[in-house]
Image (spheres, helix red, strand yellow):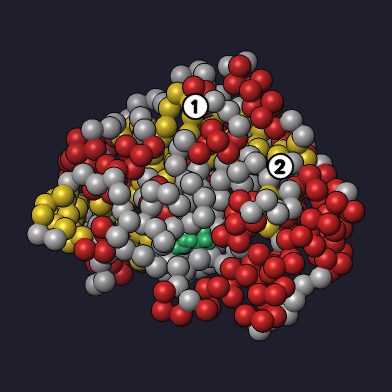
């Protein structure tokens, strides 16, 4: 079965958007499977930059069908804005290009308010969420009081669902956080102007469409959001997002069999970044970290926050390979390392005096991890115009070889700039 998952192998922002847009040339369908508009996926085509938060990164290719799976939490206000922005650019002219499962949970403004109130109240222990309401929306889903996408189109049902969703929250807003309460009327009113646009994308038979496509041999790409170490079960809990970011969740969230997946492509940067709070053993709080931030333009695509930067962490990456069953790797942003005299790579941690090279459990352990860094020589050449692997400087090739060997997984794609065309293929991943 021709299902392929593209998953972030670090702490998010690995360049999933760029590479999914590149891969989408060879795909019939691109499916976003978890998270919501906490994601910011950047695509650069012919020099024009597009940042997508909810729309799958195949959307700039008119012949590629795009789908939002039931496991995504959908900010309907943000979604309508993204759709309108694309239409204004002459894209997404055919509404059939985008389908949204009617069983997706909807994010409403009170989810964002609650997310932000909670963060504020956490003082020194903030998670550093994006404030997009992700946690509260997934809580409502698990608590069986979520408003679903399909509920939006029947006003009576919508009002009842909203009343259920806000009852407890209003007590919190009024008595605990001292902020304004919300009314179901307010919410219903605010949703009404969106309905015409949303109705055009409603899918009542989501997983059936996927099943049929897969059965017919169509190539389906599943686009992950966030990254492996932000997974709610296996990441650096509690400094994680509220969904499972792992490749396996592509199946659960979309309602397809694990047998439908035949490749898992792990996307990682040639160094490491993290936004928000939480352990980050290879973080560089020095001039080199500042340089990576500057050269890599490491500022959040969703919140604009400066990203924390550090060396590549092979212990964490090896875990990502195992947790996701990664079969092929894409290394992104190799160009950013140009000009460094030496490049650090973390090959092990020292945890309480012991050398650890394999870790599968990040809860608490990383708080005590001291990175063991090996250094490889750098290179000065600018890589952004390289069009052929043979043009890469010898030291860049050595760096790639070292990382690929350590991970025991082939690096099949190398990205050397944000543009679609700045992509080098070591091995073709898609044979037509
Ligand atoms: P995502 O969340 O995984 O899709 O990643 P983001 O879009 O949040 O962040 C990746 C950033 O790096 C974006 O600004 C991309 O345009 C940019 N980018 C992607 N690949 C490359 C690359 O190979 N080199 C450089 N210099 N920038 C890249
Ligand atoms: P993409 O898809 C990087 C981080 C937040 C915070 C934690 C929880 O662009 O890679 P949340 O709002 O999800 O409750 O925040 O997760 N986070 C991301 N970091 N890239 C993302 O998405 C992220 N989405 C959430 O910074 O630490
Ligand atoms: Mg991002």
Q: Which mark is residue 163?
A: none
Q: Which mark is residue 258?
A: 1
Q: Residue at x 55, y 73 (%)?
A: 118
Q: Residue at x 19, y 39 (%)?
A: 406
Between 13 and 364, the one nearer to me in the picture = 364
Q: Residues within 10 Å of mark 2 (few under 14, many from 20)?
A: many
Horizontal relation, residue 246 to residue 355: left or right: right
Query: Do we see residue 105 in this rendering?
Result: yes
- Relative height, residue 423 to residue 129 (above, below): above
Between 248 and 89, the one nearer to me in the picture = 248
Q: Residue at x 26, y 64 (%)?
A: 367
Secondary element at image label 1? helix
Q: Residues within 10 Å of mark 1 (few under 14, many from 20)?
A: some
- Relative height, residue 328 to residue 19 (above, below): above
* First in sequence: mark 1 vs mark 2: 2
Q: Residue under label 2, please give it.
A: 103
Q: Give x and y (percent) for residue 230.
A: 42, 54
Q: Give x and y (percent) for residue 335.
A: 32, 51
Image quadrant in which you'd find residue 339: bottom left
- Relative height, residue 339 to residue 289 (above, below): above
Q: Give x and y (percent) for residue 130.
A: 53, 65
Total count of labels: 2
Horizontal relation, residue 106 to residue 324: left or right: right
């Amino acid at each position: 079965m021709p299902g392929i998952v593209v998953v972030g192998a670090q702490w998010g922002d690995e360049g999933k958007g760029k590479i999914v847009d590149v891969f989408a040339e060879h795909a019939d369908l691109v499916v976003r499977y978890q998270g919501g508009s906490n994601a910011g996926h950047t695509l650069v085509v012919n020099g024009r930059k597009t940042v997508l938060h909810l729309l799958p990164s195949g959307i700039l290719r008119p012949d590629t069908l795009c789908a939002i799976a039931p496991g995504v939490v959908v900010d309907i206000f943000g979604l309508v804005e993204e759709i309108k922005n694309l239409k204004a650019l002459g894209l997404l002219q055919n509404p059939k290009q985008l389908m949204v499962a009617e069983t997706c949970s909807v994010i409403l403004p009170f989810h964002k308010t609650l997310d932000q109130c909670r963060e504020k109240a956490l003082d020194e222990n903030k998670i550093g969420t994006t404030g997009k309401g992700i946690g509260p929306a997934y809580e409502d889903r698990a608590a069986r009081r979520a408003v679903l996408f399909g509920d939006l189109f029947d006003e009576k049902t919508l009002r009842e669902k909203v009343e259920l969703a806000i009852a407890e929250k209003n007590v919190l807003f009024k008595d605990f956080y001292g902020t304004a309460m919300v009314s179901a009327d307010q919410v219903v009113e605010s949703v009404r102007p969106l309905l015409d646009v949303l109705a055009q994308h409603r899918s009542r038979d989501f997983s059936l469409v996927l099943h049929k496509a897969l059965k017919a041999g169509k190539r389906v790409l599943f686009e992950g959001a966030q990254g492996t170490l932000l997974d709610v079960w296996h990441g650096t809990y509690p400094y994680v997002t509220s969904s499972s970011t792992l490749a396996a969740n592509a199946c659960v969230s979309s309602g397809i069999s694990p047998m439908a997946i035949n490749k898992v492509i792990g996307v990682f940067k040639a160094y490491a970044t993290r936004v928000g709070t939480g352990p980050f053993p290879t973080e560089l709080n020095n001039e080199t970290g500042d340089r990576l931030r500057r050269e890599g333009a490491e500022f959040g695509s969703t919140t604009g926050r400066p990203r924390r930067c550090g060396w590549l962490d092979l212990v964490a990456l090896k875990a990502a390979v195992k947790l996701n069953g990664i079969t092929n790797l894409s290394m992104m942003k190799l160009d950013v390392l140009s000009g460094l005299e030496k490049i650090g790579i973390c090959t092990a941690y020292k945890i309480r005096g012991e050398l650890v090279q394999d870790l599968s459990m990040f809860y608490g352990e990383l708080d005590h991890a001291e990175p063991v860094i090996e250094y490889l020589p750098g290179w000065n050449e600018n890589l952004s115009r390289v069009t052929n692997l043979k043009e890469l400087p010898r030291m860049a090739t050595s760096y790639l070889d070292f990382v690929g060997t350590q991970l025991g997984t082939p690096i099949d794609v190398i990205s050397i700039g944000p543009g679609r065309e700045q992509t080098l293929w070591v091995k073709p991943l898609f044979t037509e």
